[in-house]
Image (tube, rainbow, N blue to C red):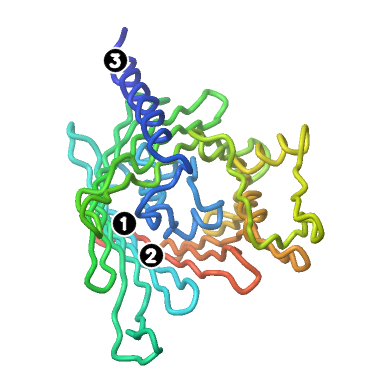
């Protein structure tokens, strides 16, 4: 067994082992600190919001797939901001460093501000306000094993502070990528493997929102376009959500019996909830247009009589001088779409 296989084999055994343990610990595939799955990168948001198997030295993408961390990210600095719904504001700062034989590193800080809330008693009498916020400090490491294989890992410290309640947790991500001779990039990642170390209330610690993704992408040979397909939640098959409100009218108003999908229709619905399809169209060297479709999001968030563009996302990337600017909008619901924006630069470019 050569050196590359000696490293890759235990890595993917580790991913498989933790996928089994985490899926057993979390029946719904969910846990605390769900904010760790909220995308802050405009490019990622435009491409479905889960992961983007694209190896072109985008430091923001490495926060969700550490195998994408490269030496070219050395001295890169990136800032991201999300104008979410109402007064919810999210932000992120990331910085990359190459440290020789030790590998390549990306450090980042994520901040999620949920605004202010009113104190009120049972009678509705208000007396002051309090805040709520989440934080995450991330240190990522990545290494290229050869021209085809790359591996990486993220270590995270997550924290929440809601009024006078707070909690802390630790988690890791592990990932690997493979670039084929034909130009297809395959990526396998396991995210948020860990648990709380201090919960809001004593004795109620829970696991992180563990998930696994398999993605592939390819820049087409004769068209300036990159195709991307992601299979999300490898660890769990049935992602359907039983909506008690019954907006689709599946419950008989007389008998109260809910109609169930069966056979091929049920299988197709469950299968499609795993897939996210997206792509990038390149217009010259400095402009790119992006878009994606998330079937699961559309099924969960749509209003049947007003489907709109729920489940779709789009974005734009523009390079201006030494700066890369990205913007995106992702439609979660007909009431509106969050705005994502980021700006990145190579600090070394200012010295040349």
Measured in 3D between alpha carbons, the distance from the residue under mark 1 to the one under mark 2, in whole angstroms, is 15 Å
Left or right of residue 349, residue 317 in this image? right
Query: In the rendered image of this protein, does residue 148 appear above or below residue 30?
Result: above
* Element on which disc 2 rests: strand
Left or right of residue 350, residue 239 in this image? right
| Residue that appears at 31% across and 7% down | 1
Q: Nearer the viewer, mark 1 or mark 3?
A: 3
Q: Nearer the viewer, residue 210 or 251?
A: 251
Quadrant of res 56: top left
What residue would you read off at disc 3?
6
What residue would you read off at disc 1?
346
Q: Nearer the viewer, residue 273 or 152?
A: 273
Q: Which mark is first along the chain, 3 or 2?
A: 3
| Residue that appears at 34% across and 71% down | 113
What residue would you read off at disc 2?
80
| Residue that appears at 48% across and 45% down | 51
Left or right of residue 238, residue 135 in this image? left
Residue 186's spot in the image, x, y percent?
50, 31
Q: Which mark is first along the chain, 2 or 1?
A: 2
Query: In the rendered image of this protein, does residue 17 appear above or below residue 192?
Result: above
Mark 3 nearby-residue class (10 Å; few <14, some 14–19, many ≥20)? few
Residue 70 visible? The answer is no
Name the quadrant of the C terminus: bottom left
């Amino acid at each position: 067994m050569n050196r590359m296989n000696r490293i890759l084999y235990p890595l993917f055994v580790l991913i498989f082992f933790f996928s089994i343990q985490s899926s057993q610990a979390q029946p719904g595939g969910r846990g605390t600190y769900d904010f760790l799955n909220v995308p802050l990168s405009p490019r990622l948001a435009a491409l479905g919001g889960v992961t983007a198997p694209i190896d072109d030295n985008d430091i923001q993408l490495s926060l969700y797939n550490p195998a994408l961390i490269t030496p070219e990210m050395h001295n890169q600095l990136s800032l991201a901001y999300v104008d979410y719904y109402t007064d919810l504001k999210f932000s992120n700062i990331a910085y990359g460093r190459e440290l020789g034989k030790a590998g390549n590193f990306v450090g980042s800080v994520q901040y999620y501000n949920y605004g202010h809330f009113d104190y009120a008693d049972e009678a509705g009498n208000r007396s002051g306000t309090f805040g709520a916020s989440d934080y995450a400090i991330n240190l990522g490491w990545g290494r290229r094993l050869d021209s085809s294989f790359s591996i990486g890992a993220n270590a995270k410290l997550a924290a929440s502070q809601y009024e006078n309640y707070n909690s802390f947790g630790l988690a890791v991500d592990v990932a690997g990528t493979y670039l084929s001779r034909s130009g297809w990039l395959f990526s396998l990642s396991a995210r948020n493997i860990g648990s709380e170390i201090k919960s809001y209330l004593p004795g109620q610690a829970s696991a992180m929102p563990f998930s696994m993704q398999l993605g592939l992408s390819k820049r087409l040979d004769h068209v300036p376009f990159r195709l991307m397909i992601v299979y999300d939640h490898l660890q769990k098959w049935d992602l359907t959500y039983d909506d008690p409100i019954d907006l689709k009218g599946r419950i008989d108003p007389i008998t109260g019996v809910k109609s169930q999908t069966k056979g091929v229709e049920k299988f197709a619905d469950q299968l499609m909830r795993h897939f996210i399809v997206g792509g990038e169209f390149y217009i010259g060297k400095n402009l790119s247009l992006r878009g994606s479709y998330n079937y699961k999001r559309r099924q969960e968030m749509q209003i049947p009589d007003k489907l709109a563009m729920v489940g779709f996302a789009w974005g734009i990337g523009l390079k201006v001088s030494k700066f890369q600017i990205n913007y995106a909008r992702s439609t979660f619901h007909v009431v509106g779409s969050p705005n994502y924006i980021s700006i990145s630069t190579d600090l070394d470019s200012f010295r040349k």
